[in-house]
Image (cartoon, rainbow, N blue to C red):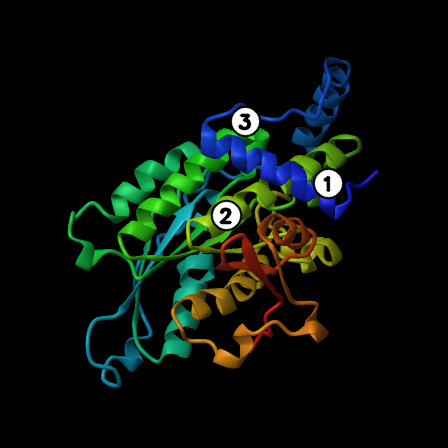
Amino acid sequence: MPMSKAASARVARRIATAAAYGGGGLSLLGGAAVGLLFTEAQLAKRKIGGSDDEPPKADGVYGTAFAGQHPGRPVRLGVLGDSTAAGQGVHLPRQTPGALLASALAAVAERPVELRNVALPGAQSDDLERQVTLLLSEHDLDLAPDVCIVMIGANDVTHRMPPSHAVRLLSDAVARLRTAGCEVVVGTCPDLGSIEPVGQPLRWVARRLSRQLAAAQTIAVVEEGARTVSLGDLLGPEFAAHPRELFGPDNYHPSAEGYATAAMAILPTLCASLGLWPTEDERPDAARRESILPVARAAAEAVAEGGTEVAGVRGPWALLKHRRRR
């Protein structure tokens, strides 16, 4: 039976609080369920493929046609996270989420965008410290990215990292980037229950664990002054409706069309973080089910719908947004 939004908010707040104070993780499962879940996991592994291919390298400058129209240096975009952030499963650099976002951001800003992607396939949240260090390795804050995209969490769930530990590591990484002057947008843990070959009851458990982690990530990230976008049913609600088109050949990582769907869900928040989205869109629109809520409640609402943004407004309050795609 699904948890209510209020109950989800309470669980997410407990995880986030445990992360802040160094507490342990939360467990949903008793020992009696382990055998059944192990069997389901083995069946899922047989159906889900896997790719050992290195994601294509997409680092470089995008939107060079705008170089003569805007004085000064390019906008610097950093990408951190796991295989989804790296673009595993596609073969062309322009199909990766980093390249898609860099190209789109250049078009909106009408200036070049310099992309640096340090995401690592298989990464868990404990790799974020290394990735942040790579982006800030020059020890010159003037060379830090202007904005960073972080996509992390799926491997924390599948490798059973305690959620409070995963959230604390993410919070620390966001805090370092914010201290360096970076705007930060975090794509929260995708809903692993949407992976087609996963059967019940593993699908229910995967969905519940990933959504709890995503909500707790949202609370921690917003409290560090950054924004989140819910990646929902594995990077957007379209995945549930069109799995054959939006998953890649391994049935796990997105296809090129799936990455494009994810990038377009993140793009409005990315632009808004740099002040490049219309200011009238910053106010909550009741017709789009937007509102200002306590941050834990906003986090619980966001995980239920892919593409939902959460941003802090003041104190314990957050703005829940369903931005128009332009």
Residue 16 position in % (x across, y down):
54, 37
| Residue at 24% across, 56% down | 144
Q: Nearer the viewer, mark 3 or mark 1?
A: 1
Question: Number of marks in the image?
Answer: 3
Q: Residues within 10 Å of mark 2 (few under 14, many from 20)?
A: many
Residue 207 horizontal/vertical position (percent)? 70, 39
User: Which quarter of the rendering shows the C terminus?
Assistant: bottom right
Q: Earlier in the sequence, mark 3 or mark 2?
A: 2
As drawn, 78 above or below 110: above
Q: Can you say whether 76 is above or below 230 in the image?
A: below
- Whether label 3 touches label 2, CB < 8 Å: no
Q: Amino acid at mark 2?
A: Thr
Of the residues shown, which amino acid type is indicated by label 3? Pro
Q: CA distance from mark 3 to mark 2?
A: 21 Å
The residue singled out by tag 2 in the image is: 84
**Residue at the right extreme, as displayed:** 1
Q: Residues within 10 Å of mark 3 (few under 14, many from 20)?
A: some
Q: Earlier in the sequence, mark 3 or mark 1?
A: 1
Q: Which mark is residue 7?
A: 1
Residue type, mark 1 in image: Ala
Q: Is residue 67 visible?
A: yes
- Residue sitting farthest toward the front: 315
- Residue 162 bears which disc, if any? 3
Q: Residue at x 26, y 52 (%)?
A: 180
SS at mark 3 in the image: loop
Q: Earlier in the sequence, mark 2 or mark 1?
A: 1
The answer for how far apart the CA atoms under marks 2 and 1 are is 29 Å
